[in-house]
Image (cartoon, helix red, strand yellow):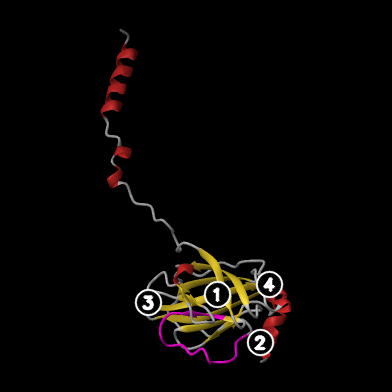
Amino acid sequence: MSPLVVLSAVHDGIRMLAPRWDYFWWIRPKRVAYPGRMPNRSGLIHVNPCRYYLVGGPDYDMSIDGSNGLVAAIGENGVKVMCGTDMGPVRVLLRALTGVAKTEPDWDTVAEVDIVASENWIRVMSSELEMRPDLGNLACSGPGRYRVRVHARGRDDASRRGFVEEPVEEHLLEAWPVDSATPAALMTDLDDVGVRFAAS
């Protein structure tokens, strides 16, 4: 038998005896299911009239008037979101992030506002005070202060229609933890609905 054949056989034997680490699944590093953010949630929220809320605790006052045309802080634990839909469903998508949101194109109006989560959650609440935990939780880092970025499109179209049975308007809500308070701010120009809300 040639030396090359012997060496090949020895090599194959050593390789067969070597530990196969992929078999030891319990010591493999665990994958993070959602690196950088929590699972996205989407659904419909019923508005009547022209608003819904984000709530992170008991300190909010829905009677507070005014907004920057899209959002308004209504106490430490509350945010009011203004809609073009007078009565009917609005489609919302929630993203809970661990860092600052990236710029999202193709939205009519975008604004930011702070909210404080007194507990482990920030949830959507309808105009009729129905809490919607099925739409997800924006407080991915537990209690504390968060910055919320609200994107809206279709508000002008929804406003012209008045009552709608199917959603015409869409919102994207993103939130991430922050250390210090910052006033609410517009990130884009206002649509026609926002101009009317800001002037009222």
| Mark positioned earlier in the residue sequence (2 or 4) | 4
**Residue highlighted by disc 4:** 154
Residue ID at (52%, 68%): 94
Q: Give, as a three-letter code, the residue at label 2.
A: Phe
Q: Give, as a three-letter code, the residue at label 3.
A: Pro
| Quarter that holds the N terminus | top left
* Left or right of 66 in this view: 132: left
Residue 145 in the image: x percent, y percent? Answer: 43, 79
The secondary structure type at the circle numbered 3 is loop
Q: Are marks 3 and 1 in contact (CB under 8 Å)?
A: no
Residue 100 in the image: x percent, y percent? Answer: 50, 70
**Residue highlighted by disc 3:** 143
Q: Are marks 2 and 4 in contact (CB under 8 Å)?
A: no
Measure the C-alpha gap from mark 3 to mark 4: 33 Å
**Residue highlighted by disc 1:** 149
Mark 2 is surrounded, within 10 Å at the Cα level, by few (under 14), some (14 to 19) or many (20 or more) other residues, namely some
Mark 3 is surrounded, within 10 Å at the Cα level, by few (under 14), some (14 to 19) or many (20 or more) other residues, namely some
Q: Are marks 3 and 4 in contact (CB under 8 Å)?
A: no
**Residue highlighted by disc 2:** 197
Q: Of residues 1 and 82, which is closer to you in this image? A: 82
Q: Is residue 55 magenta?
A: yes
Q: Give, as a three-letter code, the residue at label 4.
A: Gly
| Mark positioned earlier in the residue sequence (2 or 1) | 1
Residue ID at (68%, 72%): 154
Residue 121's disc is: none
Q: Of residues 2 and 96, which is closer to you in this image? A: 96
